[in-house]
Image: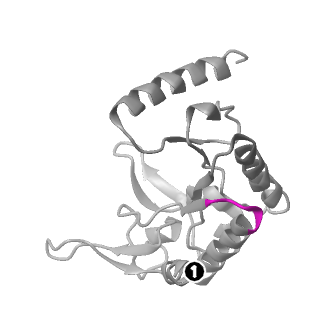
Amino acid sequence: MAEMPTRFNEFLGRAAEIARARFRGRLTYCCLPFERVNWELFDILATDAGYRSAALADRYPDLMRSYVGEGAKLGKPVAVTEFGCVTYRGAADMADRGADILQWDPRTATPLRLDGVYERDEQAQAAHLLEVLNILDEVGIDTAFWYCFSRPDLIHRDDPTLDLDLASGGLVKIFDSVDGAAKTWEPKLAFAALAKRVR
């Protein structure tokens, strides 16, 4: 394990070299908290560690501030490339583990059902989005990305026992196709909250 950071950064160095030979824009790599990335290889310091769970809430601003400090030392902007929560009551406390309520078909790797009964709470998802964005702004993060726009594999249904969208971090809910028509979508409250926030 002691050799892993060196070998990993050698790999990233080769990847960055190949990318720069073909791409003229700025490069980044989205790290996890335990990765020790050589940020000299990249133009933007980026992390997927933007999820704020209940267990991390008191330390979250300081964790995000540490990325800002590292970026400042290098003279590089900092991006949080994933944050968010799913759409049932209490999911914001779970952060990136909120989707663990899904049961999957082991043969096809498709979602089948929820592991219990959960209460839809779009208001809490929207509130979480705004709370985290406010923290990221306060500590000086340059840009942030909500986890995803949609999860087409997690269909919204009126029956809460079959509403797979409860496990979706998407800003929109997806409806089943009808009579061969394309799937349709509808904004959740988080979509409207984000749209208002970034105007």
Q: What residue is pinned by disc 1?
A: 197
Q: Main secondary structure of the magenta part?
A: loop
Classify residue 36 as left or right of residue 66: left
Residue 189 in view: yes
Question: Does the magenta segment cover residue 140?
Answer: yes
Q: Position of residue 94 (x, y in %)?
A: 68, 61
Quick one: label 1, few (<14), some, or many (20+) residues within 10 Å?
few
Say which quadrant the N terminus sits in. Answer: top right
The foreground one among 154 and 68 is 68
Classify residue 121 as left or right of residue 159: right
Mark 1 residue type? Arg
Q: Secondary structure at mark 1?
A: helix
The foreground one among 18 and 85 is 18
Q: Position of residue 110 (x, y in %)?
A: 37, 52
Residue drawn 38% across the image and 40% down it? 24
Q: Position of residue 156 (x, y in %)?
A: 40, 75
Residue drawn 47% across the image and 80% down it? 188
* Magenta stretch in the rendered image: 138-142
For residue 169, above or below residue 70? below
Residue 136 occupies quadrant: bottom right
